[in-house]
Amino acid sequence: MDEPGAARDQRQVEIDGLRADLLGHRRRRALAGVGELVEHRVDLVIGGHDHMYERAQFGGIKYIISGGAGAPLYDVTARGSATAFSASRYHFVEMQVDGDRVHAVARGTKGEVFDS
């Protein structure tokens, strides 16, 4: 990441090892690195690995967790307070980027929309 307060001309910031602990199946009380994300004006975090789908918002940052590509799915009955929507189902997420806007649609294996 660039230095705090430095001029940014990039639209994307990659963060190695981000653990979205409020999201996914881990459900811890804190989100590792959220202060740094806020400091660098990150709007959206897209993650995978957790075998489920989740859309959430915490600290003014939107999160999409997508990991429903084929491994056994996690139970999502215990939702975190930041969770807006979650599903334990096989899926993919289709994203359309238009300038600085991103529109995401979660689709089931037959293409049906289940979250947007």
Image (cartoon, rainbow, N blue to C red):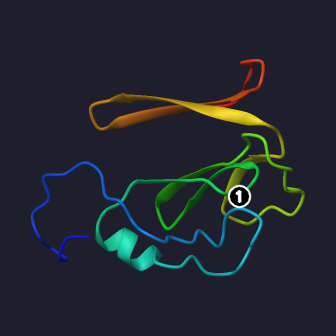
* Label 1, residues with CA under 10 Å away: few <14, some 14-19, many ≥20: some
**Above-or-below relation of 6 to 51:** below
Left or right side of 11 for 62: right
Question: What residue sits 46% from the left and 78% below the top?
Answer: 33
Left or right side of 91 for 89: right
Given residues 81 and 77, the one toward you in this image is 77
Question: What residue sits 75% from the left and 19% below the top?
Answer: 112
Q: How far from the left and from the top, in percent, is residue 105? A: 60, 29
Secondary structure of the residue carrying tag 1 is loop
**Above-or-below relation of 57 to 106:** below
**Above-or-below relation of 40 to 112:** below
Q: How many marks?
A: 1
Left or right side of 36 for 27: right
Q: How far from the left and from the top, in percent, is residue 36? A: 36, 76
> Which residue sits furthest left?
7
The image quadrant where one finds the N terminus is bottom left
Question: What residue sits 74% from the left and 72% below the top?
Answer: 26
Question: What residue sits 57% from the left and 76% below the top?
Answer: 31
Q: How far from the left and from the top, in percent, is residue 113? A: 71, 23
Given residues 24 and 51, the one toward you in this image is 51
Q: How far from the left and from the top, in percent, is residue 16? A: 42, 69
Given residues 82 and 51, the one toward you in this image is 51
Residue hosting label 1: 50
The image quadrant where one finds the C terminus is top right
- The amino acid marked with disc number 1 is Asp
